[in-house]
Image (cartoon, rainbow, N blue to C red):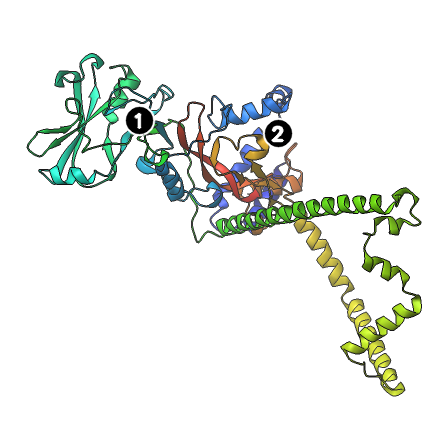
Amino acid sequence: MVPDIILLITMCVSLLMTGFIKSVLVLVVILTSLSGSSDADKKKLSPIKPRNQTEVIERLSRFLGIERIPGRIFHRSPPQYMLDLYQSITDSGGLMKRDGPYKADVITSFPDRKWNQSMHFYYNISYLNEMEKILAAEFHVFKMRPAPSAHAHANSHVMEIKIYQILDPTNIYSLNSLRLLDARRVSTHGHGWYVFQVKKAVECWVNGTYPNHGFLVETTSVRGKQVNGTKIDNPRVRFAQRHQHHDSKQPILVVYTDDGQSRNPNYISPTDEDYLQIKEDILKKERMTQFNRKDFKHALKFLNERDRDELQNEHLKKLLGINSSHSRSRRSANVTISVTSKKKRKLSKEERRKRKLARKNRKGKRKRLSKEERRKRRKMRREERKRQREILKQGKGKRALDYFSYNRKRRNCAKHQLYVDFDEIGWSGWIISPKGYNAYHCKGECPFPLGQGQKPTNHATVQSIVHALKVGKDVSTPCCVPNKLYSISLLYFDDDENVILKQYDDMVAASCGCH
């Protein structure tokens, strides 16, 4: 045993790269802890076989942190802010290229619920997880363009928008029933989106300090005179509310949270070779999808035309008294009845030969070679065949080696396609983007000796040597696993019509190696 260990250490010194000698100490761990696993451990590691497809999908939803899968298709457009946010932090296929706002891994937008009071906005945040840490909360409201008559009556070009948390819904006209959250001065004549910080109110609602009664929006002039709000219903200042305006202008509450799980984000880089390869795969799939869609439309059109022609032919047969079952030949039964087809069948063999010859003459007469020229051409072809045989004979060994290397390279550890299609799973009705992504998977052998092309770890190199020497008991070859993983983001509806943008780490295998 001792000579084997000495030999093993000597091989490590000669084979492993500089700076790795200290890692040879891991041999002690390999020879002891990897001596074999008990039956109890094998039972613990054995996978649980799913009973049906539904159970598999439920496991996937639990893994993604989606407690309740929506049972309907959402026809409402998601907020434009969430779409823009998704586009800003992700690339093709949902691959993340940067952190989201406030470094939140879960961003939820809540739609405004219908409320009787004007300037009163209510949001159902019961779907927020109490275990998640609230990093920020924003109230997004759209100020409508003022009417032309309002410009003439405006005494000031500047006004102040105030956002209150409603503490007592029975008396929302009293300041004692309100809590000021945020305020901003804006142009009286302006219109568009305005964002206000309302984190304090959301924290109170989640913690149970105050019940959720929503927000109240009040607008005042610079002098403090109320322009619009709880006491005066002045149409000069209007804000879009639910069911009153287009979906693109609906007010939303956006909450940024941290789910508390350990994170290992790995974002793409424009110069990363692994990312460039994935990018090329995504573009190929998009081109193929577009081609298949175009080809399908063309085939559908062709089938419709063929069906229409068949009906027309059947109608003509009935008019002419022709029974297709008594056709004289298989070919004539499928030929469309027309005057031109009848003429073609009447042509004799000699006439067809003359027509063919005439077509050749129209293209130009071929130059007829002399007997000597034909002999020279035959000689040149013989010499070329002889030269090719010599090349094949000399390169036979090389070609066999190349074939062996190709097969071995094909069996070695490598990355392979694994596309997850949400449409096939049945989730395309509520997952907004992406519609699917390429997760990839690693497959192949890790034979001794491991090369740098297989991206082995130090531990895998030692394990490969131990396996080759048969020193350790039950020491297998290293495994082909991902050695770099990318993060992705999903944008989807939950079953309460909220739109969620969530980050998932270690979802795409960027490269594979022997570990």
**The residue tagged with tag 2: helix, strand or loop?**
loop
Give whichever of 329, 394 is nearer the camera.
329
Q: Which three-letter amino acid code belongs to the residue tagged 1?
A: Ile
**Residue 513 placed where, x, y %?**
56, 44
Q: Position of residue 451 (x, y in %)?
A: 59, 50
Q: Residues within 10 Å of mark 1 (few under 14, many from 20)?
A: many
Q: CA distance from mark 1 to mark 2?
A: 48 Å
Residue in the image at 67% along x and 38% along y? 470
Q: Secondary structure at mark 1?
A: strand
Q: Is residue 431 left or right of residue 418?
A: left
User: Which residue occupies the foreground of this view, 324 or 197?
Assistant: 324
Question: Which quarter shows the C terminus?
Answer: top right
Q: What is the number of the mark on residue 397?
A: none
Whether residue 107 sits left or right of residue 14 in the image: it is left
Please tell me which residue is depicted at 29% across the width and 20% down the height of the picture.
115
Instruction: Kindly identify which residue carries mark 2.
Output: 35
